[in-house]
Amino acid sequence: MLAWYGGSLYGKDAQGHEQYQDNVSQAEVQSASTFKTITLVAALQKNINLKSTFAAPAKITLPGDYVVGNDEGEAGDLGYKDLIEATAASINTVYVPLGQNIGVQNVVSTAHLLGIPDNTALPIEAGITLGKDPVHAIDMTSVYATLAAGGVRAKPHMVDKVVDGTGQVIYSGNPEAKQVIPTTVARDATYALQSVITDPTGTGTKARLAGGREAAGKTGTSTDFRSAWFCGYTKEVSSCVDMFRGGGTDKELLKGIPGAEKGVYGGTYPARIWKAFMDAALQGVPKSKFDPPAFGGLVQDNEPAPTPTPTDTPSTAPTSGLTDLLGGLFSGNGGGQQQPQQQEQQQQPGANRPNRSSKPPGLFTDPLG
C-alpha cells in the first residue's frame, strides 16, 4: 500500500454528520457500478467475447419481477451494445441480465477470486452487479490491482521491508502473490475499462491522466447518491476513491454539495480526485502501455439481422442466395468479427467499432431468451 486516507472526520461535525470508522479498512459502503468490473471478468471467464452484443433497453424486468433501469439521464432504448460500449456507458440493462445469464454464483466466486474477502456477505441476487452490497475500499482496490497485475492477486500489506543498521533485510512483506485469472482475461477486461476513460461517451472521462498516460477504471454511483466511486489503475498503481456520508445510508446522501447539489456521480468528484492523486503519484514514472487485448472467447451476436428490403429485381442465378449465405458464413467476417484491415484500430478503446454484417436468421441464439 502506497497511500491511505481514512477521512477527515472522527466523531460528529457541526452539521451533525458522524463518523467513527476508518474509511479505507473499516467502513463498508455500496460499491455501486465499480462492481460491474467483477461481472465483466466473470463473463470473460465464461468465454464471452468483448464484441458480443446485448440488448440495452431503457428498462427490463427480470425473473422474480426484478426491475432494472438505466440512469435517469439515459435517453430511452439504447439499441444493442457490445461489452466495450456497455462498460464505457455503464449500462445497467446490459450488465444485470449478463450477470444472471452467466450465473450470479459465478459473479460471487469471481469477486472472492479477485480480492473481495470470503467473509464479505454477497447474497446470490441479481442486484449484486450494481454493487448493492457493502464492501471495504481496500478490497475494491485489491480487485483492480489484480487486473493491473495481469490477473495476479496479492495480499495488501503496509510494510515492504525492514532493514537493520548493517543494511541487512530482517523482514520482507509477504504479498502471497498468486495468478487467479488468465492474463488474457485481465487484458480484455482492461481494454474495456480503458474505454470508460477514453471514449467520449464514457462515464469516466474526467479521470484522464496527464500527458495521455494509459489508465483503466470504472465509475460507480449508488441509488439515491448514497455513495460515489472511481476505481482505476495503470500498470504500476491501482487506487480507489469513494465518497459517502456517515454510514452511506439512504438518510445520509451525497446531495447539497457545491458543484453537485443534486447528487455526486462517480464520474465527477471521485474521478477528478482519482486523477489528481494518480497524476501526483506517478510523477517521474515513465509512461507504460497496457498489453493489447486478446479478444478471447466466442462472439454472441444477439442483434437481429436487418429486415430485408423488398425488391422486384429478379435473381440472376438460382444459386445466388445459397452462395451469399455460404460466403457470409465462411468469409471470416461472420459473427461480428472484424475485417483484417481493421485489426490495427482495435488498440483505441471506444473508437472504430467493428461493423457487423447481416446474418441469416436462426444461426445465432440469444442467451437471454
Image (spheres, grey):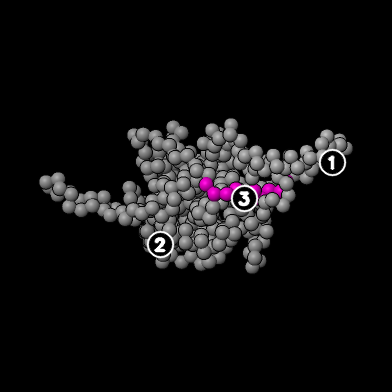
Q: Is 259 within the magenta? A: no
Q: Is residue 54 left or right of residue 170?
A: right
Which quarter of the image is occupied by the C terminus? bottom right
Question: Label 2's element?
Answer: loop
Query: Looking at the picture, which amino acid does disc 1 mark?
Result: Pro
Identify the residue under disc 3: 300
Q: Are marks 1 and 2 in contact (CB under 8 Å)?
A: no
In this view, the residue in front, 49 or 74, is 49
Predominant SS of the magenta segment: loop
Query: Rounded to the nearest whole Å, what is the CA distance between mark 3 and mark 1?
Result: 28 Å
Image depth: mark 1 or mark 2 in front? 1
Question: Label 1's element?
Answer: loop
Q: Residue at x 40, y 62 (%)?
A: 117
Q: Is residue 194 left or right of residue 66?
A: left
Query: Rounded to the nearest whole Å, what is the CA distance between mark 1 and mark 2?
Result: 58 Å
Q: How many marks?
A: 3
In this view, the residue in front, 304 or 124, is 304
Q: Quadrant of residue 309?
A: top right
Q: Mark 1 or mark 3, which is nearer the start of the sequence? A: 3
Label 2 environment density (alpha carbons within 10 Å; few <14, some 14–19, many ≥20): few
Identify the residue under disc 2: 117
Tag shown at residue 230: none
Label 1 environment density (alpha carbons within 10 Å; few <14, some 14–19, many ≥20): few
Q: Is 301 within the magenta? A: yes
Identify the residue under disc 1: 310
Q: Residue at x 56, y 43 (%)?
A: 202
Q: Are marks 3 and 1 in contact (CB under 8 Å)?
A: no
Please report the bounds of the magenta region as a residue range.
296-305
Query: Looking at the picture, which amino acid does disc 2 mark?
Result: Pro
Query: Rounded to the nearest whole Å, what is the CA distance between mark 3 and mark 2?
Result: 32 Å
